[in-house]
Amino acid sequence: MSATGWIRERFTGPTPGPAPGATGTWPRTALALPFIGTALIVVLDYLSGTEVTVEPALTAVPALAAVVSHRTWYPLAIGLCTEAVAFLMAFRGDALGQSVHAASVVAIVLVAAIGWVSATLRLRQERALADAQLVASIARRVLLRPVPERVGTVRAAVHYEAAAAHARIGGDLYEVVNTRHGVRAVVGDVRGKGLGAVETAAAVLGAFREAAHQEPALDRVAGWLAVSLDRALHENDHPGVEEEFVTLVLIGVGPGGAAEIVNCGHPAPLLLRGREVRPLELAETVPPLGVLDPADVRPPVHRVALQPEDRVLLFTDGMIEARDRSGAFYPLAERFPNCADGRPADVLRRLHEDVVRHVGHQLGDDAAMLLLQYDPAPAPNVQLPHQNGVLARG
């Protein structure tokens, strides 16, 4: 077993994509198609009589075998069976010495060989794709860690879809941490896609995980991220460093429900209270990180008092820029209350399904959503000393 195969079984479980020796997207019953095709050709040859031969049609059978199977030997085996059928048909039609029979025999051999090569190359590509998906899945677990259902005084859930085909990670970022300053979260969007966007997202997330615990002020956390981003881009000689930037929104929720929000060029979060949705917009706009010199990053802090069961939705522009066939943007603020029943994870699942229905297909851009529901834990039932022989409970 290869190293990646061992890692797949021990660490991540089954990897998306067909496993070696599997039939991929074709069901196993599809392996019978070459035999069905051969039977149809034989019947057609029998019904046509001996004056007309359909033997050349047998060359399509090994080609069909190469399409429906991921086993490299299958086209060769079907080719041998097809050759036997070709000789039987030629013998019945007294065409063994004719050129059409010789041409059919040669063509079947060539098609079977090409099918074997095609199946071999396809299997290698699928193995490489499965290994790449494995690496992407591991990278996502390290970079974009799973969000627990409860973090401090909030219930949380995240939903993330990468735009790149077969990818599990892109340029959007998110994180939720519980600190001595309260629960802190970030959602951001890196300009661009590909490995460069992943590197930038890793630099921002690494800085946030440190700054969120160290800095008591949320605006200072944004300044820390700006310094780390600038250093990462210049030290690594990042391509296109002059055009690189990151939009993000930071939110901190204190024990009493006092929330602070810092926004750096990102779409405003949505606050859902009951059935009413309110964007948490700032009076003063701040450019994304990477536009200004890190020393000039001093974003204002927006404060709002959360009530129990209030929900704050942070998202990237992949959600609000999703268009339907007529070009209309997805009305996230309008649809949010209709999907807000149940646990935070259920809410995000319904929102994702709704935006996909709106677009009519999978989204063409990275899209991340983070939902925080303020749900302070109930006070513990503390036993107080006896008063006049009665046990008091707090």
Image (cartoon, rainbow, N blue to C red):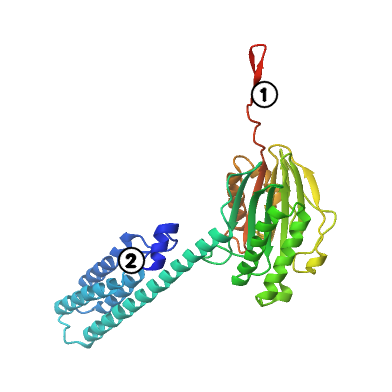
**Label number found at residue 241:** none
Drawn side of residue 42 relative to residue 364, left or right: left
Tell me what residue is drawn at x 29 percent, y 83 percent.
110
Q: Residues within 10 Å of mark 1 (few under 14, many from 20)?
A: few
Residue 394 has which mark?
1
Closer to viewer: mark 2 or mark 1: 1
Residue with the most extreme right position: 283
> Do we see residue 244 in this rendering?
yes
Q: In screen coordinates, is 293 left or right of 131?
A: right
Pinpoint residue 102: horizontal percent, then vertical percent: 22, 86
Which picture quadrant has residue 91? bottom left
**Which residue is painted at 64% across and 61% down in the image?**
206
Give me the disc on residue 21. Answer: 2
Crowd tier of the residue under label 2, counting other residues whose Cα lies within 10 Å: few below 14, some 14–19, many 20 or above: few
Front-most of residues 170 and 262: 262
Q: Please name the residue shown 70% across and 71% down the image.
A: 231
The CA span between labels 2 and 1 is 65 Å
Residue 372: x %, y % from top left: 66, 46
Amino acid type at image mark 2: Gly
Answer with left or right where residue 14 lies relative to residue 172.
Answer: left
Of the numbered discs 2 and 1, the one sitting upstream in the chain is 2
Please name whichever residue, 314 or 32, is drawn nearer the observer in this view of the structure: 314
Amino acid type assigned to the residue bearing label 1 in the image: Gly
- Does 372 sit above or below residue 288? above
Q: Position of residue 257 (x, y in %)?
A: 73, 40
**Left or right: 108 with respect to 211?**
left
Q: Secondary structure at mark 2?
A: loop
